[in-house]
Amino acid sequence: MSETQMKHPAGHFTGLWIGIGVGIGSALGVAIATAIGQPAFIGIGIPIGVAIGAGIGAAKESQHKAKGLIRPLTDKEKQQKVAVRVGVALALLGVLVLMIVLFLA
């Protein structure tokens, strides 16, 4: 199969473009905060990047789906997705517990 005919798992382009959007949005947030002289606005670019990236990713996903280049997730990919979500949830829980311990001490 040629590289242009390679099938991608469902959600591939959405996740890819959200990641690209976060990167560009982070740079945008730093530029905005620097331009207006308010460091509090550094975080404003990330949600903007996520929104734009999700929109572009969804559009790309639907284009590739119409061409038949999107395949459903395999069982292994589904298990990996669940494992990543559990890992992120545990990491967030750990950060929350650390913050509580630090602020209450």
Image (spheres, rainbow, N blue to C red):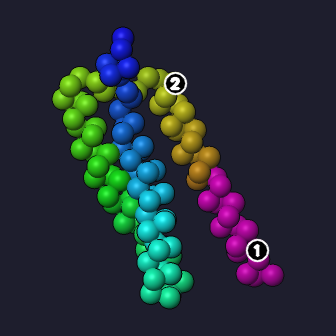
What label does residue 101 carry, if any? 1
What residue does disc 2 label? Answer: 76
Which region shows up in magenta?
90-105
Percent coordinates x, y for residue 21 in the rendering: 41, 56
Give me the residue at 44% from left, 23% from top: 74
Which structural element holds mark 2?
Answer: helix
Amino acid on which the number 1 mark rests in the picture: Val
Foreground residue among 31 and 23: 31
- Could you give the CA–CA distance between mark 1 and mark 2, rounded to whole angstroms? 37 Å
Percent coordinates x, y for residue 79 in the rendering: 52, 31
Task: Judge whether 67 appears above or below 14 on screen.
Answer: above
Task: Judge whether 49 appears above or below 56 on screen.
Answer: below
Give me the residue at 50% from left, 81% from top: 34
Percent coordinates x, y for residue 13 in the rendering: 36, 39
Give me the residue at 47% from left, 74% from top: 31
- Quarter of the image where one finds residue 36: bottom left
Which structural element holds mark 1?
Answer: helix
Q: Quadrant of the C terminus?
A: bottom right
Amino acid on which the number 2 mark rests in the picture: Lys
Give me the residue at 33% from left, 52% from top: 54
- Say whether residue 96 is left or right of residue 42: right
- N-term mark: 1 or 2: 2
